[in-house]
Amino acid sequence: MGEYIKVMSNSFSIYCTGGDEFAIIYFNKSLETVKRETALALKECAELHLDDSIPVGATIHRADISMYSQKEKFYKEKGLETRKG
């Protein structure tokens, strides 16, 4: 399926399925609960307020730097080699 990342609680686990894609597997939750939680998470993301004075390209660049920094930290903590290229 993908590389196991972490059991966040007894209700779900997160897997890296490749690249920057992830899968969340829920345990003992109804489909309606998962749909409701997903809709809430998407709503919260849509309501994020960005500083309009920062160009979109700069915001994406900062997000990329942060993401790759977190990925490098994850690989180091797990004793894995980072994927290059």
Image (cartoon, grey):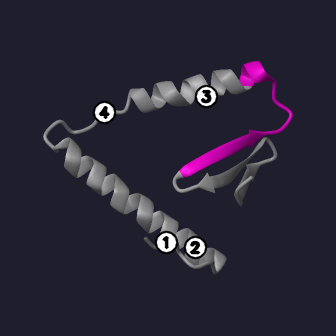
Q: Of the numbered discs in the image, which one, if any, rests on residue 6? A: none
Amino acid under label 4?
A: His
Q: Tell me which label, 3 or 4, sits earlier in the chain.
A: 3
Q: Is residue 24 above or below residue 35?
A: below
Q: Is residue 29 left or right of residue 75?
A: right
Asked if the residue under mark 4 is in contact with the one under mark 3, i.e. CB atoms within 8 Å, the reply is no
Residue located at (64% from left, 27% from top): 37
Residue that numbered label 1 is attached to: 72
The residues bearing labels 4 and 1 have C-alpha atoms spaced at a distance of: 27 Å
The residues bearing labels 3 and 4 have C-alpha atoms spaced at a distance of: 20 Å
Residue 25 at x, y percent in the picture: 75, 42
Asked if the residue under mark 2 is in contact with the one under mark 3, i.e. CB atoms within 8 Å, the reply is no
Q: Residues within 10 Å of mark 4 (few under 14, many from 20)?
A: few
Residue located at (54% from left, 31% from top): 41
Residue that numbered label 2 is attached to: 75
Residue that numbered label 3 is attached to: 38
Q: Tell me which label, 2 or 4, sits earlier in the chain.
A: 4
Q: Of the numbered discs in the image, which one, if any, rests on residue 49? A: 4
Q: How many marks?
A: 4
Q: Is residue 33 above or below residue 76?
A: above
Asked if the residue under mark 1 is in contact with the one under mark 4, i.e. CB atoms within 8 Å, the reply is no
Q: Is residue 58 left or right of residue 21?
A: left
Q: Nearest the camera: 83 or 56?
A: 83
The residues bearing labels 1 and 3 have C-alpha atoms spaced at a distance of: 27 Å
Element under disc 2 = helix
Nearer to us: label 4 or label 1: 1
**Magenta region:** 21-33
Asked if the residue under mark 2 is in contact with the one under mark 1, i.e. CB atoms within 8 Å, the reply is yes
The residues bearing labels 1 and 2 have C-alpha atoms spaced at a distance of: 5 Å
Q: Residue furthest left?
A: 53
Residue 73 at x, y percent in the picture: 52, 72
Element under disc 1 = helix
